[in-house]
Image (tube, rainbow, N blue to C red):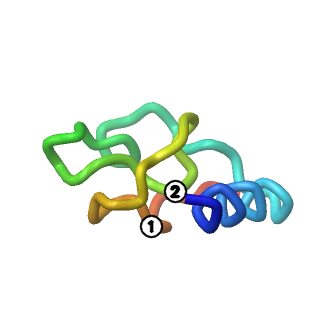
């Protein structure tokens, strides 16, 4: 979990905002979860918890 938080905060340091609230960037939990730059913490266990919809 600490690795995900560090990666999320590094994303902010490099200019990334939170993912926009769209279906493409915030899929439902049934679709394997949220992405790394989601507004709230992710578990790290779902497929989508990596980097995908980063907006700079």
* Marks 1 and 2 close (CB-CB < 8 Å): yes
- Measured Cα–Cα span from mark 1 to mark 2: 5 Å
Q: Quadrant of the C terminus?
A: bottom right
Q: Quadrant of the N terminus?
A: bottom right
User: Where is mark 2, residue-wise?
Assistant: 36
The x and y percentages for residue 53 are: 48, 58
**From the viewer's perspective, is residue 35 above or below residue 28?**
below
The x and y percentages for residue 43 are: 41, 50
Identify the residue shown where x is 57% and y is 36%: 39
**Horizontal placement of 41 versus 56: left or right?**
left
**Horizontal placement of 36 versus 26: left or right?**
right
State the SS at label 2: loop
Q: Quadrant of residue 8?
A: bottom right
Identify the residue shown where x is 52% and y is 56%: 36
Q: Earlier in the sequence, mark 1 or mark 2?
A: 2
Identify the residue shown where x is 33% and y is 60%: 45
10 Å crowding of disc 2: few (<14), some (14-19), many (20+): many
**From the viewer's perspective, is residue 47 above or below residue 41?**
below
- Which sits in the foreground, 48 or 44? 44
The x and y percentages for residue 50 are: 44, 67
Q: Quadrant of residue 46?
A: bottom left
State the SS at label 1: loop
Identify the residue shown where x is 82% and y is 65%: 14
**Horizontal placement of 40 versus 9: left or right?**
left
Question: How many numbered badges does the structure rendering display?
Answer: 2
User: Where is mark 1, residue-wise?
Assistant: 50
Q: Quadrant of residue 52?
A: bottom left
- Which sits in the foreground, 43 or 19? 43
Q: Name the residue furthest front.
A: 2
């Amino acid at each position: 979990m600490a690795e995900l938080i560090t990666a999320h905060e590094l994303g902010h340091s490099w200019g990334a905002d939170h993912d926009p609230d769209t279906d493409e960037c915030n899929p439902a939990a049934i679709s394997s979860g949220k992405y790394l730059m989601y507004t709230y913490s992710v578990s790290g266990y779902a497929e989508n918890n990596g980097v995908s919809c980063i907006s700079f």
